[in-house]
Image: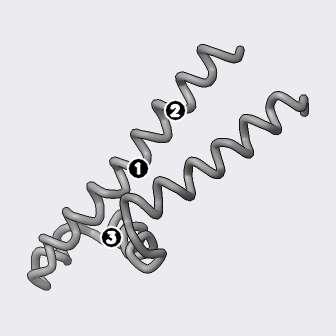
Amino acid sequence: MSTKAIVITAIDLVIFILLIKIIFKTGKDFLRSIYYIFYPNILSILKKDFDNDVKYTYKLLLLLVILFVIVVIEVKIFY
C-alpha cells in the first residue's frame, strides 16, 4: 500500500468520525440507525415505530451518500 493511499484512508476515517458526530450526535443514535436499516418496515409499522425507522434510516443513508461522494471525488483527484 502506498503512502498516498494510507494518508487518504486516514483522512477518510477522520471525516467518517466527524460526520457521525455531526449527523447522529451520539454513538447510540448511530447504532440505532444500523438497527433500523435491517429491521423490517412492516414490523415497525405494526409496532407504531415507523417514524423512528424512517428518521434513523434516512440519517444513515445521508451519511453513506456523503461518504460515497467524498470517495468518488478523491478517486477523481488522486488517481
Q: Earlier in the sequence, mark 1 or mark 2?
A: 1
Q: Position of residue 52 (x, y in %)?
A: 19, 73
Q: CA distance from mark 1 to mark 2?
A: 11 Å
Amino acid marked by disc 3: Tyr
**Residue shown at 51%/32% (left/top)?**
70
Q: Position of residue 8 (x, y in %)?
A: 72, 35
32 or 18: nearer the eye? 18
Quadrant assignment for the N terminus: top right
**Residue shown at 46%/30% (left/top)?**
69
Amino acid marked by disc 2: Ile
Query: Viewer-nearest of labels 1 and 3?
Result: 1
Mark 2: few, some, or many residues within 10 Å (few <14, many ≥20)?
few
Query: Do tag 1 and tag 2 residues touch (Cβ < 8 Å)?
Result: no
Total count of labels: 3
Q: CA distance from mark 1 to mark 3?
A: 14 Å
Q: Earlier in the sequence, mark 1 or mark 3?
A: 3
**Residue shown at 63%/51% (left/top)?**
14
Mark 1: few, some, or many residues within 10 Å (few <14, many ≥20)?
some
Which of the labelled discs sits on residue 70, or is there none?
Answer: 2
Amino acid marked by disc 1: Leu
Which of the labelled discs sits on residue 63, or is there none?
Answer: 1
Q: Position of residue 32 (x, y in %)?
A: 38, 75
Q: Which residue is mark 3?
A: 36
Q: CA distance from mark 2 to mark 3?
A: 24 Å
66 or 35: nearer the eye? 66
**Residue shown at 89%/32% (left/top)?**
3
Q: Earlier in the sequence, mark 2 or mark 3?
A: 3
Q: Secondary structure at mark 1?
A: helix
Query: Do tag 1 and tag 3 residues touch (Cβ < 8 Å)?
Result: no
